[in-house]
Amino acid sequence: MFRADLLYKPVVVAPHQTVTQTQRLFAGAKVNSVLEAYEATGVPNFSLAIDWGWFRWFEKPIFWLLDGLFHATKNFGLAIILLTVVVRGMMFPVAQRQFASMAAMRAIQPKMKAIQERYKDDKQRAQAEVMALYKAEGVNPLAGCLPMFLQIPVFFALYKVLTMTIEMRHQPFVWWIHDLSAPDPSHVLNLFGLLPFTPPGYLGIGVLAILLGTTMWLQFKLQPAAMDPSQQQVMAVMPWMMMFVMSSFASGLLLYWTTSNLLTIAQQRYLYARHPQLKAQAEKDQTDIDRAAKRDSKKA
């Protein structure tokens, strides 16, 4: 099934002379620690036999940390959970700034509404005035997206670790999860194996995917509601869309994301306790949005 050719440069062998070619062959699993040990003895770039890609400068530290946590806990599922705790802990100061920015955004909502009412027939002028208001108040509307963007490299690195390294292959977690590098084998549509059929990948919704969608929905419910109706619709649909999209990914990725959502929920509750005015404003905004939705439904 596989063939490898080793081609030598042409060599002229003189009469009564000999030429010797010496090669070393490694045949075995690409265990990172083994490859790095050979590399340390003088075999250059031998650890690159694992295709880390362009971002190995970020992926390998994540792998080293995850592998170290595994050797400490003897369970890769627990190692992934601890990795999530480490990542969320490092990003906690960013989350604090995010909530401070959200509080500032809520504080200037009356001024924004006044601008939108004043220039409701001139969208371009209204947008310019809102941007000027942001600058004058020192508010960054994109600050709330920063924690999500910071998690993307970690998520991508974990995806590469799960798919490229042999250390994660066939590693169990608990109960029905026997391989964290494979999709969740529990399928709701066939009643967890009681019905004699296997759903296709995009419909293979497992327990981890449902937990992912539910925790994401709870996370969005705790956030201040968006004033734009289109944004509200996106936020309402996204958790369940991600549940379907992520269902075919490795169980370890779903475990990481679900744990991250739970930690974010706990983080949001803690920060709401420190910023009661933000929570009160969020509840008021949600009440106003619900009333507006009821009025619109009655008119329809």
Image (cartoon, rainbow, N blue to C red):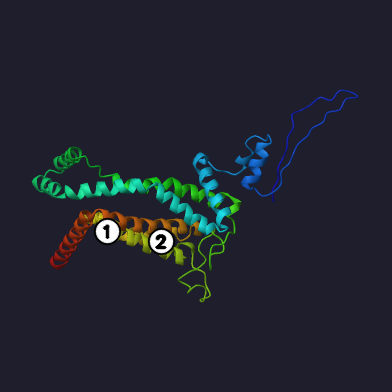
- Residue carrying label 1: 233
Q: Are marks 1 and 2 in contact (CB under 8 Å)?
A: no
Residue at image point 45% right, 56% down: 256
Under circle 2, the secondary element is: helix
- Seen as rendered, the residue at the extreme right is 16
Quick check: 261 left or right of 161?
left
Q: Position of residue 19 (x, y in %)?
A: 83, 28
Q: Residue 205, relative to residue 119: is it above or below?
A: below
Q: Is residue 142 or residue 120 the one in the foreground?
A: 142
Give the quadrant of residue 26.
Answer: top right
Under circle 1, the secondary element is: helix
The answer to whether residue 103 of the structure is visible from this angle is: yes
Cα distance between the residues tagged 1 and 2:
19 Å
Callout 2, which amino acid?
A: Leu
- Residue carrying label 2: 212
Q: Is residue 14 or residue 238 the one in the foreground?
A: 238
- Seen as rendered, the residue at the extreme left is 118
Task: Answer with mark 1 or mark 2, whichever residue precedes in sequence.
Answer: 2
- Seen as rendered, the residue at the extreme bottom is 194
Residue density around tag 1, few if under 14, some if 14–19, many if 20 or more, within 10 Å: few
Callout 1, which amino acid?
A: Gln
